[in-house]
Amino acid sequence: MSLEQKVMAELKTAMLAKNEAALRGLRAIKAAIILAKTSEGAGGEVKEEEEIRLLQKLIKQRRDSLEIYRQQNRPDLAGKEEEEIGVIEKFLPRQLEGQELREVVRKIIEATGASSPADMGKVMGAATKQLAGQADGKSISAAVKELLSQQV
């Protein structure tokens, strides 16, 4: 079942339940899928890797907004963003965090032969490719920096 089909099924359920938070999140996903499908060169289809990138982008946008709303002391708007993040995250694969993420990054560092912070670009390229959909770039970058700085 494609992401679009899953979203449509969830959308129907959310409409029947009158769940406003779920409706906002699902409509955002649906709109992003439609934009991706109709973009130049897409050919009317969205590949699974593109779907994951699309979902990650939606979450990143909401986290950025969430941060701004918190800085401006707007808990009402921040709450809406948090709800939408929760809805969108349900469609992503399980996210790696903490020690689990560092363990995968450590293996990538060994595989690439990186030995210092100067090799960060090489490690980030491999890590981003391998961990696509399982961790966001910010988390990957932090883990790579931490582990490479320990090797010096």
Image (cartoon, helix red, strand yellow):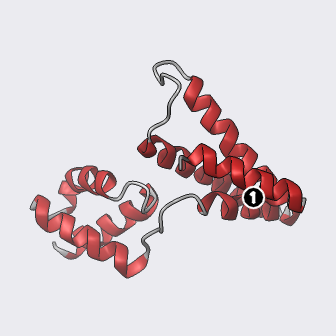
Please give left or right for residue 16 compared with residue 45 in the image. right
Residue that sits furthest to the top in the current view: 40
Please give left or right for residue 74 compared with residue 39 in the image. right
Q: Residue 126: image x %, image y %?
A: 24, 53
Q: Residue 81: image x %, image y %?
A: 75, 58
Q: Residue at x 85, y 53 (%)?
A: 15
Q: Residue 87: image x %, image y %?
A: 69, 61
Q: Residue at x 38, y 54 (%)?
A: 132
Residue that sits furthest to the bottom in the current view: 99
Bin the neighbour count of mark 1 within 10 Å (Cα to Cα): few under 14, some 14-19, many 20 and up. many
Q: Is residue 31 above or below residue 15?
A: above
Amino acid type at image mark 1 = Glu
Question: For this rendering, which residue is in front, 46 or 64?
Answer: 46
SS of the residue at dot 1? helix
Question: For this rendering, which residue is in front, 98 or 51?
Answer: 51
Question: For this rendering, which residue is in front, 12 or 74?
Answer: 12
Q: Residue 67: image x %, image y %?
A: 69, 60
Figure label count: 1
Q: Quadrant of residue 32?
A: top right
Quick check: can you spot residue 47?
Answer: yes
Q: Is residue 87 above or below residue 99?
A: above
Residue identified by numbered label 1: 81
Please give left or right for residue 106 compared with residue 83 in the image. left
Q: Residue at x 53, y 51 (%)?
A: 56
Quick check: can you spot residue 114?
Answer: no
Q: Quadrant of residue 91?
A: bottom right
Q: Quadrant of the C terminus?
A: bottom left
